[in-house]
Image (cartoon, rainbow, N blue to C red):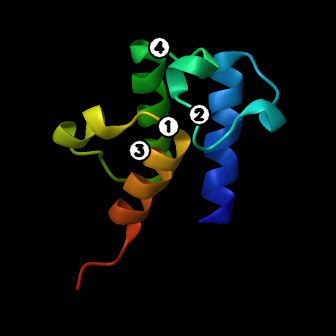
Amino acid sequence: MLALRSEIIRKVAELGELEEKDVAEDQPLKDLGIDSLMTIELVVFIERMIQRQFPEERMGAIRTCRDIFREVETLIQPAS
């Protein structure tokens, strides 16, 4: 998961035209310069990485990188 987190932070920094060190996990994406279209781009990037789809109903819950990490962890957990 650490590698995924790093890739997500890198993509957020790229989209927001920031340095990776300037991306705080709890900072709202909008405060990082990420608008709704960029959020969709970010989600598509993540879906391709993890080869799973974010449920549409969970998209509204994504406000920070920490929210993204939580959703990704849920998606990649093996089914029990």
Number of other residues with Cα within 10 Å of mark 3, as a class: few under 14, some 14 to 19, many 20 or more: some
- Separation of disc 3 and disc 4 at Cα? 18 Å
Under circle 2, the secondary element is loop
Mark 1 vs 2: CB contact within 8 A: yes
Number of other residues with Cα within 10 Å of mark 1, as a class: few under 14, some 14 to 19, many 20 or more: some
Q: Say above or below: 70 vs 34.
A: below
Q: Quadrant of the C terminus?
A: bottom left
Sequence-first disc among 3 and 1: 3
Residue at image mark 2: 27
- The amino acid pointed to by label 1 is Thr
Furthest residue toward bottom:
80
On residue 35, which mark appears?
4
Residue nearest the observer in this picture, 70 or 26 = 26
Under circle 4, the secondary element is loop
- Separation of disc 3 and disc 2 at Cα? 22 Å
Q: Say above or below: 65 vs 17.
A: below
On residue 47, which mark appears?
3
- Judge left or right: residue 2 versus residue 57: right
